[in-house]
Image: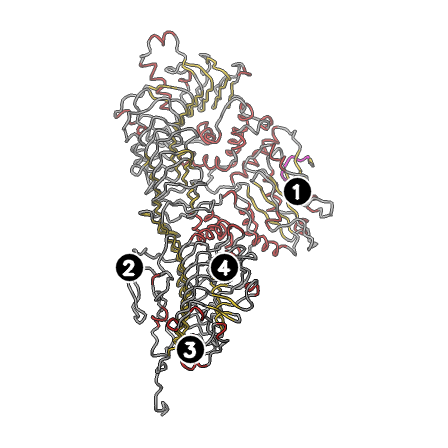
Amino acid sequence: MQRIDATSVEEVVKRLIPYLEDTSSAAHKSIYFDGWSGLGASAVLRAIAENPAPSLRKKFDRIIHVDCSRWKNPRQLQRAIADQLKLPQHVMDLFDRQDEEDDFSGVEESSRAEVIYIGKEIYQTIKDLSCLLIFHNGSDDTVDTSKLGFPLYDWYNSNVNKVLWTFRGRLRLNPKIADNVDSSHLNINNRFYYSFEIWKVLLATEAEEITQYSGELHLDGTKAAECCLYLLSLNYRGGHIMDYNWATHACNYWVCDGIITVQEEKGGGSLQEDQAWEPAAALHQEIRLEDYSSNSVPGLGYNLDTPPNRWVLVTPESDMKDKPTLETTSLFIAFQSVVLLPDDMFHQANKVQVLRLCNCAFNFSSPPFHCCHNLRFLGLDKCQDHRTQEAGEDKSNTSSALEALEIFQRLWVLDICYIDWELPFPTESTREQQMAMNIREVHINKGRIWRRNFAWRRLKNLRKLRVIEPTHPWSNKGEIDEFADMLKLEILDLSKNTMIQVLPSLCGASSLKTLILDDCVVLEQVGPQGLPPSLESFSFASREGNKAKISSISLAGCSSLVNFTLRGPLQNLRGLDLSGTMIKMLDLRDVQDSCIGQIILLRCEKLCTILWPEKGFPNLSMLHIDSLVCHVETEQQQAYATVMDLRFVQSLVLRSNDKFCWNCNKTHINICISSTPKDATPKKKTMSYYSAQKVVGSPLHMPIVTTIQPVVCYKDVNLAMISAIELEGSSAPRHEPLDIHVEIGEGISYANVVSEQALSAVSFMMNKAKSLHVHDNFSITSVNPKHVILTEAKEITWNCLKRCHIKRCHKLNTVFSTDYISSCFETLEAFSAAELMMANCIWSRGRTASPQDDSSFAELRSIHLHYCPRLTFVLPLSWHTRTPYSHLPRLETLHIVYCSELRQIFPVEAVALRGKPRGVLKFPKLKHIHLHDVPKLHEICEISRMVAPVLETIRVRGCWALKRIPAIDGSLRGQDSRPIVDCEKDWWEKLEWEGMNVGHDPSLFEPRHSMYYKKALPRCSLLR
């Protein structure tokens, strides 16, 4: 650690420059500056960055300055650096894309990391330059600048980069934060002992820095410095005994004390809040108050020159010697045990505007501070009522009781904690309507201020109301209009209220932004009526051990709602409705023991992700979602989902990736840009081979013959016959949607599915699908491209898929990539494809499994292909089976029409023949082979002999390169059971045969030829 002796920002700048210019091998690359016990560090860094010395300009090609003292995440810092370097817009757009990706993945804002690609772009921009990075670090940890794209040690370049940084800024003075700076950084700070005047200047410098952060902060540096002085001096003197609650009340202290003044309108008396409260709140937001609430800045106030007698703190150490004077504006009295206040304590406290008492005893009906006529803030914590004997004999003394009420009417802010202060509010009347028009905030914790019924609507100027764990109800049960006409109320916190069974109507609170109902265990219902559309934040949390009675929460129509918190054990919660809200991420991970059966999310246009509990909601049978990326509707144990962005699939799947989020017997997922209305149950119609009639209903239920029809040169062939799904004697199933059906349609791309969570969810969905229909998509090149294939348990193996139909996907090259670790397509029964204009193969070549595999494609019964003009092969047999003849043991039907480039249907790799008779593969169930216009097909299976012992029909047209048909077991076939071969006579006569002894002889088949199988050609010339 290096200490320097300087009393101004300018002096420190001069002292730091030599450290920055030192580029020797022994010099530190990273320099941390801690300022004067935290003060002034931010100003020093800004001075160096905005007005660098000529020597620094000469030493460094670029000086980059970024201020992330209000910390969000490392990505924010990287974005700020990219902005300074003016990277191209297409690079900057990657930040938004990654943010969007994280939105879909449910990544918290604070956990968003650097973008690797942008880090590379930053490095490419600065690698030939010497750069100085100056940044304000608002996090609690050091930053690895190499991840940002700014390496300090680059072995490939001789240029030197250096970093100057600080944890400080925004009055962040916790001395412990500097302990996080390790030895790899040169730690520099200033000496501690200076005069009050120097510290005053340093504080003013810090305050001036703070005022620059917000354009809405209409406050000069002098006022900001005075506010900071108030905070630091009082925190130093009483932070160990007095709970100032800075996070809630700092801005209230500043305004009520008169540091930031409030003017009153002539003749009115209403507050000009824009002149004080808004700037005070803005200053409040810019200062990091976490350390002060935990009393982590104990010592700095000692060095500050506090105005004498203005801000007075009375503690046991002062032994009542410190009393308010005529100059006192803020008075804090705190004891560790209850002490009776002297009668003369407030005789000279006429100017006191802020009063906070802790463990004090006084007469509640006639408080001794009644003489403080300018009192604006009153805080009472653990105080006790102490009545004189005379007052005790006449508790109904009206004039005495009204003194307390008069105090209340002067206040702007009231904070009550562990006190029952029963104010004698009169019954509601015209006079009462004007009561306490100036009070803006009421905070009550484990206490009350009312004796009997009290309607909050009387306090029409109220902005914030917190009534936490009250000791007595403020109204009769069933009263629902107690918040009526509270037009200015912004925050309502009713936490731990065990007396509210029905939430009062809040329709009249048209400015309400925050509603907190944590641990309201007897509350049974929230909404749907009685909530204002202005609501932005809602919280309902239940602690462990509580038995919350809440059964329904409906915030439907709260069109401004962006933050929704629900957590804890909620055993009785049955329904949740957030329709019409602006929620982007719905986090339900912390909901425990819930019986939620209904979740409604209609018109939630911003919804990107839903985070479910680990085990989900077992009773969830009704889920309705309507957003820009997904439509979900569940009814009668059936779930219909239309997903317009594949990344949203991870919100339909539990994070454990073992089940869908709903509890339904049937699931239909349609993945496409435009929503497709869910069909009714398909109506089945019979269809003959020689009928072109189409089956209506689900797209999976359509015939494969489509609108694109190549020229037909055979008069005796009906394409509907060739491509019919329903075959005589075939047990191949029809393509109807099954219990879990996935449909992929137009506009969908896998390009933006990159996160591991999203890939895992897509993998789960694909592996659970029992039927699959992919159609009219012009983006994907494979149904499961390489980057979607994960390892081990997360890979896509399609092991539940039974029926698959692919149609009109003109960019598909490889339909399925089969480079799997384990077995795949174990349950697939029927496959069909049509109009795949660019497809080279259906299943790719490559390693399919471990050395032995009897499961892959074991249930496949039918393959139907229509008009795939670039297809060269269908399914390579690239795995080894334990038992002979079991690669496709149940294949019954093979239909291929108009595949002009097809050369082989089943290429065979060497591993498939291991342990088999040399060059022989048997297809024990194959019955029907239909080949039409496949001119380059020279073999069905790439082996010496293909055996189909139960073959029944072969229909062939236009397959002139095919020289062999499968052999049969002639010894088991009679003359009447010979396979029928319907083909051209010319083709039949050119077939090659192996002999009767191997079941491959013309006599074993029954050929059938049409005499007029070709269209008649014109007799005369067409030339004129």
Report x, y in % for residue 778.
Answer: 43, 64
Question: CB of mark 1 within 8 Å of CB of mark 4?
Answer: no
Locate residue 915: give its quadrant. bottom right
Report x, y in % for residue 789.
Answer: 51, 55
Q: Amino acid at mark 4?
A: Pro
Which mark's residue is nearer the viewer, 2 or 1? Answer: 2
Q: Which residue is mark 4?
A: 785
Q: Which mark is residue 683?
A: 2
Image vertical order of residue 898 relative to residue 376, above or below: below
The residues colored magenta run 4-9
Q: Nearer the viewer, residue 258 or 635?
A: 635
Q: Is residue 202 left or right of residue 511?
A: right
What is the distance, in whole Å, between disc 3 and disc 2 at their CAs? 35 Å
- Label 3: element kind: loop
Q: Amino acid at mark 2?
A: Lys
**Upstream in sequence: badge 2 or badge 1:** 1
Q: Which residue is mark 3?
A: 958
What is the distance, in whole Å, between disc 4 and disc 2 at their CAs? 34 Å
Magenta-drawn stretch contains 8: yes
Question: CB of mark 3 within 8 Å of CB of mark 4?
Answer: no
